[in-house]
Structures are given as C-alpha cells and as structure tokens.
Image: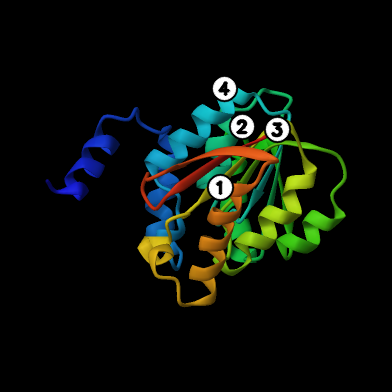
Amino acid sequence: MDLSTLDDYCIETTQAEPDLLIELVERTYSEMGYPNKLSGKTIGRTLKLLAKIAQPKRALEIGMFTGYSALSIAEGMPNDGKLICCETNPRAIEFAQSFFDRSEHGTKIQTIFGPALDIIESLEGEFDFVFIDADKRNYLNYYQAVLPLVKSGGLIIIDNSLWQGRVLDPKENSDIAVNQVNRLIAQDTRVENVHLNVRDGLNIVVKH
C-alpha cells in the first residue's frame, strides 16, 4: 500500500480551505523561501476544527511564517478571541499581515516580532490554546515555557512532531529536542496526549 496515496486521499476528502488560504499557499510558494514550512491542508483544517471545538478566548502561536496556520486557528475561534503570534522573520510578518487584513478573522490576530522565548516570558495571563511550530531545537524549551501559562483543560498542539522520521534515530540537535519533548509529554502527569501520525506528526496535549 502506498502511504503517500493515502495521504493524498485524506487531503482530497477533507473539506476545502477558504479561497483566501488557497491564494496564501500559492503566493507563499511563488514569493517566499522555504514554502514547505506551511502547515498544509490537513493540519490547517485540524487546527480550525480543534479551535472550533475548544472555542479559545486567548491563543498563542509560536512560529507563524506566512500566516496559514494563524488564519486557520482564528477561523475556528470565537469573534472575541485573540491569537498572539510570535515570528522572527519581518518579511513573513508583512506577507501574513496582507492576508490578515483581507480576512474577516484577521482582527483576532496580533503578531509580535522577536524570539518566542523572550515573548513568552513577557506575557501575562492564561492561554486556552497553544500551537508550537517554530525552530525544532527549542521545542522542549517552548513546551516547558508555555505549560505554566495554559489553563486547566487548555490545548497545546505541536506540529512536525515526527520530524520527517528523525525522532526514531535522533542525531542532530533538532532531532533530539523533538524526541525529548515527545518523550516528556508521554510521561508528564500534568497533561494527557495523543500523538498522531498526520502529515509530519501532530502531538495534541490537554493540560489537567
């Protein structure tokens, strides 16, 4: 059985993104470097669905890139929800903002430029929903930094948690960090989780 064909089937049988997100994907591939950083349709629709179920009033995204996942999360949030996004690439921020300005959900999104760990340290109050999709070397640090800020019953969602299979034989710092956070979560009595083999891995965590 060809697993890539099954992946294509899942994409085909998942409801379509809004036209604005389809345009965002096309322009990211034509105008930006490293377009493979995009979360993709199945992850984006999963984020939207989880946000629609959880109805977070305050959410945090670590690693925004061109805004695909941010708009997906915001789409599922209530009208009075606020999503804070951390991003270190000024060009990506400018690109994303041009799409936020055109979206009915864009007013829910606030982008902060700078290293995510510094931004997290400066934030006050609790979060209902956190999405981690930034530099893999800091995945363990991000998880440990945000967990105290997540309210009971809140979600932490970690993208690329399989890291192209490198977690099975971790050698580089990024491989090791992603494997470490997965292993920690599986034993962490403060949370419960399910680790899904979707696209490049999605670790969904709920805080007790």
The amino acid type of the residue labelled 3 equals His
Q: Nearer the viewer, residue 159 or 42?
A: 159
Residue 59 rendering spot, x and y as whole percentages: 70, 38
Q: Are marks 3 and 2 in contact (CB under 8 Å)?
A: no
Placement of 120 over or under 127, stated as above or below: below
The amino acid type of the residue labelled 1 equals Ala
Calculate the distance from the C-alpha at mark 3 to the C-alpha at mark 4. 17 Å
Which of the 4 quarters of the picture holds residue 16? top left
Calculate the distance from the C-alpha at mark 2 to the C-alpha at mark 4. 17 Å
Residue visible at 46% across and 64% down in the picture: 32
Secondary structure, mark 1, is: helix
Asked if residue 55 lies left or right of residue 28, the reply is right
> What sort of colour scheme is used for the picture?
rainbow
Residue 76 rendering spot, x and y as whole percentages: 57, 27
Q: Which residue is mark 4?
A: 53
Residue 139 rendering spot, x and y as whole percentages: 61, 60
* Quadrant of the snapshot with the C terminus: top right
Q: Are marks 2 and 4 in contact (CB under 8 Å)?
A: no
Neighbour tally class for label 1: few under 14, some 14-19, many 20 plus, Cα within 10 Å? some
Calculate the distance from the C-alpha at mark 1 to the C-alpha at mark 3. 14 Å
Q: Are marks 3 and 4 in contact (CB under 8 Å)?
A: no
Q: Which residue is mark 2?
A: 105
Calculate the distance from the C-alpha at mark 1 to the C-alpha at mark 2. 34 Å
Q: Which residue is mark 3?
A: 208
Q: Nearer the viewer, residue 92 or 61?
A: 61
Secondary structure, mark 2, is: loop
**Which of label 3 and label 4 is nearer to you?**
3
